[in-house]
Image: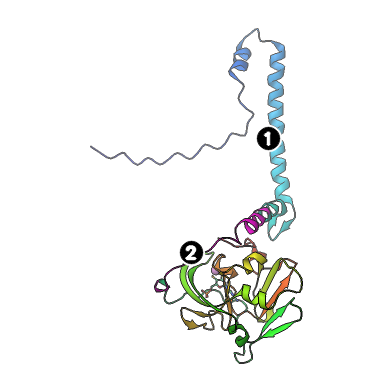
């Protein structure tokens, strides 16, 4: 008994770019010396129509790729992306709860990734969180934030690059902050920015109000380190890591969809998972 020889799978045949095969009926007629002229004409017309479709397909493809590019994607593709994003935003972000874990499962040491917008030194003593778009502009201290109900959660942290960890977060719900310092008018988005706006993310309002969206000041039971975004960062387990902005200096309520650092570089604006 010998094993089957390993035969490499044949490469898939490329789809022939040719008109459809004539039907059996047409072939029979074509082979017939007494073929009826009308049938010949119809067969010919079939070929011409198929050829025209093939040419239109090629022209369409060329057209698609020659369209103006938005963020390096031809705009018709971008429209499809945006449609998908709308579906995502409307259907999923508000209702779903991200799974939670026993705190004993946290990944130690916590992984560090991404330091955009974090190079400027910050003054821990005089650190302030600016809120724009409330009844009046606000400048909150860490004590103002700690006055909100404190929440804890152990959730998965997923980076879009393919790794994930389990993290335990301590902080306040962004929803509680929004309830205490509400927007002056109904808005659709919340923008968050680092000092100097080196890194910035946008959230649809439902994601901002999600019960697991925290303004966190501690990770795995320790105050945030500089690398993890001290003194305040976002923990939003319904989204990929990119939305978990570190070192938040400004929160703005807005009706204009906020620019998003990685969204501007080709990633899905919502970045849910
Ligand atoms: N300010 C700032 N926040 C950021 C980033 C960044 O480059 N700058 N990177 C993001 C990405 S891609 C990830 S995966 C997480 C990593 O968070 P961590 O370092 O706490 O693991 O931070 C996010 N928040
Ligand atoms: Mo990431």
| 52 sits to left or right of 96 | right
* Mark 1: few/some/many CA within 10 Å (<14, 14-19, 20+): some
The disc at residue 196 is none
Answer whether residue 121 is visible to the viewer in this image.
no
> Counting residues from the N terminus, which is met first, the one under dot 2 or under dot 1?
1
Distance CA(mark 2)–CA(mark 1): 49 Å
Quadrant that contains the N terminus: top left
The image quadrant that residue 261 belongs to is bottom right
Q: Residue at x 52, y 74 (%)?
A: 113
Single out the mark in the foreground, 2 or 1: 2
* 154 up-or-down from 81: above or below: below
Q: Which residues are magenta?
A: 83-104
* Mark 2: few/some/many CA within 10 Å (<14, 14-19, 20+): few
Percent x, y of residue 51: 69, 31
Pick the front one: 89 or 64: 89
What is the image's colouring? rainbow
Q: Circle 1 sits on which residue? A: 54
- Figure quarter occupied by ligand 2: bottom right
Percent x, y of residue 218: 51, 81
Q: Circle 2 sits on which residue? A: 99
């Amino acid at each position: 008994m010998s094993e089957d020889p390993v035969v490499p799978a044949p490469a898939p045949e490329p789809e022939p770019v040719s008109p459809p095969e004539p039907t059996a009926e047409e072939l029979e007629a074509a082979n017939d010396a007494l073929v009826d002229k009308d049938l010949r004409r119809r067969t010919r017309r079939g070929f011409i129509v198929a050829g025209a479709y093939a040419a239109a397909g090629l022209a369409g493809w060329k057209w698609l790729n020659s369209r103006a590019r938005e963020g390096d994607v031809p705009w018709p593709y971008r429209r499809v992306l945006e449609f998908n994003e709308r579906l995502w935003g409307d259907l999923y972000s508000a209702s779903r709860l991200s799974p939670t874990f026993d705190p004993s499962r946290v990944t130690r040491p916590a992984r560090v990734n991404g330091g955009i917008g974090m190079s400027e030194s910050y003054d821990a003593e005089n650190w302030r969180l600016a809120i724009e778009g409330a009844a009046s502009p606000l400048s909150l201290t860490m004590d103002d934030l700690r006055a909100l109900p404190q929440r804890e959660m152990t959730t998965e942290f997923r980076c879009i690059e393919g790794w994930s960890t389990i993290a335990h977060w301590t902080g306040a719900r962004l929803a509680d902050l929004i309830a205490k310092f509400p927007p002056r008018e109904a808005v659709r988005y919340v923008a968050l920015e680092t000092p100097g706006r080196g890194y910035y993310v946008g959230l649809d309002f439902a994601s901002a109000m999600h019960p697991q969206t925290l303004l966190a000041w501690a990770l795995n039971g320790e105050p945030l380190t500089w690398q993890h975004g001290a003194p305040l960062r976002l923990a939003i387990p319904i989204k990929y890591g990119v939305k978990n902005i570190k070192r938040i200096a400004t929160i703005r309520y807005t009706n204009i969809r906020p620019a998003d650092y990685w969204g501007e570089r080709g990633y899905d604006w919502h970045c849910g998972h």
